[in-house]
C-alpha cells in the first residue's frame, strides 16, 4: 500500500507535496549529458558523482552559493561554461511538462492548505518559481536550501507543518522516496509513497478527498 502510517480518519487540514518526480519530471539526460561529456561519464554516473560529492549537502542545505557551486563543478567535470550557461544546463534537468496537472492543485487549494517540501538548491528554486505556474497554489514553500536541512531530518517536516498551521495528524505528505514518506509517518503525519499519478488520484478518491 502507498499509505504509510495510520489511516486517515477524517479529511486532512493540509496536503504537502514533494516536487521532483512527484510534480516535476527529473530528466538527467537533459542536463547532465553536458556535464559528463568531458569527463567521459553518462548522465546517471554524473548524478551518482553529484550526490556522493562531499559538498552536496552544503549545496542542498544552503551553505554554498550558486557561483561557488558552479566553480566547484567546473573543476570536477572540466566544464568551460559561463555561470549563466551553467545555470541553464543545471535547470534543464527539470522537464517543463509536469507529472501532475496544475488543475489538481487549483482544485485542492479550495479545500486544503497546500505546501511544497523539497530537497533542492537555490538555482532550481529560482527557476521553479519563475517558470512553473503551479507554485501559485502553494502559499507555503519549504526548500532545504532555505531552511538549512534536508529530508528525512524531522526538522524540515516540522517547519512545513508550522507553515501550514497543522499538527502532524492533520497533514498528508506525498513523496516519491519511500524513506522520506516513512519519515513523515514516523512523526505522526500520513505519508504517501508516490509511484504514479493514477495511483495518487485513486487514493484521493478512496479517501474522499474529492468530496
Image: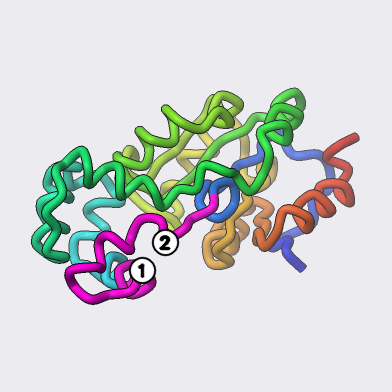
For label 2, the crowd category at 10 Å Cα-Cα, with few meaning under 14, some 14 to 19 and many 20 or more, is some
Cα separation between marks 1 and 2: 6 Å
For label 1, the crowd category at 10 Å Cα-Cα, with few meaning under 14, some 14 to 19 and many 20 or more, is many
Q: Secondary structure at mark 2?
A: helix
Labelled disc at residue 161: none
Q: Which residue is rendered at x = 80% and y = 49% of the image?
A: 201
- In the image, residue 13 sits, relative to residue 56, either above or below, namely above
Q: Which SS type dominates the magenta stretch?
A: helix
Q: Which residue is rendered at x = 20% and y = 38% of the image?
A: 84
- Location of mark 1 (residue): 43
Q: Nearer the viewer, residue 184 or 31?
A: 31
Q: How many marks?
A: 2
Does the magenta segment cover residue 119? no
Image colouring: rainbow
Residue 80: x and y, percent?
11, 54
Left-right relation of 8 to 116: right
Q: Which residue is rendered at x = 27% and y = 58% of the image?
A: 57
Magenta segment, which residues?
25-48
Residue 188: x and y, percent?
63, 53
The quarter in which the C terminus is drawn is: top right
Q: Which residue is rendered at x = 63% and y = 48% of the image?
A: 99
Marks 1 and 2: CB-CB under 8 Å?
yes
Left-right relation of 160 to 60: right
- Location of mark 2 (residue): 28
Residue 147: x and y, percent?
34, 40
Left-right relation of 166 to 154: right
The quarter in which the N terminus is drawn is: bottom right
- In the image, residue 123 sits, relative to residue 206, either above or below, namely above
Q: Secondary structure at mark 1?
A: helix
Residue 152: x and y, percent?
45, 59
Left-right relation of 140 to 146: right
Q: Nearer the viewer, residue 27 or 159?
A: 27
Amino acid at each position: 500500500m502507498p499509505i504509510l502510517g495510520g489511516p486517515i480518519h477524517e479529511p486532512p487540514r493540509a496536503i504537502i507535496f514533494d516536487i521532483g518526480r512527484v510534480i516535476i519530471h527529473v530528466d538527467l539526460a537533459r542536463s547532465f549529458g553536458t556535464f559528463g561529456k568531458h569527463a567521459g561519464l553518462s548522465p546517471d554516473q554524473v548524478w551518482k558523482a553529484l550526490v556522493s560529492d562531499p559538498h552536496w549537502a552544503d549545496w542542498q542545505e544552503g551553505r554554498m552559493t550558486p557561483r561557488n557551486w558552479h566553480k566547484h563543478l567546473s573543476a570536477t567535470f572540466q566544464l568551460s561554461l559561463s555561470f549563466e550557461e551553467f545555470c541553464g544546463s543545471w535547470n534543464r534537468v527539470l522537464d517543463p511538462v509536469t507529472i501532475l496537472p496544475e488543475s489538481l492543485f487549483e482544485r485542492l487549494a479550495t479545500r486544503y492548505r497546500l505546501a511544497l517540501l523539497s530537497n533542492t538548491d537555490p538555482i532550481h528554486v529560482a527557476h521553479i518559481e519563475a517558470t512553473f505556474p503551479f507554485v501559485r497554489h502553494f502559499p507555503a514553500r519549504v526548500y532545504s536550501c532555505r531552511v538549512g536541512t534536508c529530508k528525512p531530518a524531522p526538522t524540515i517536516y516540522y517547519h512545513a507543518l508550522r507553515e501550514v498551521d497543522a499538527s502532524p495528524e492533520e497533514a498528508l505528505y506525498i513523496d516519491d522516496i519511500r524513506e522520506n514518506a516513512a519519515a513523515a509517518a514516523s512523526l505522526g503525519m500520513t505519508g504517501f509513497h508516490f509511484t504514479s499519478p493514477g495511483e495518487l488520484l485513486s487514493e484521493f478518491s478512496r479517501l474522499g478527498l474529492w468530496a
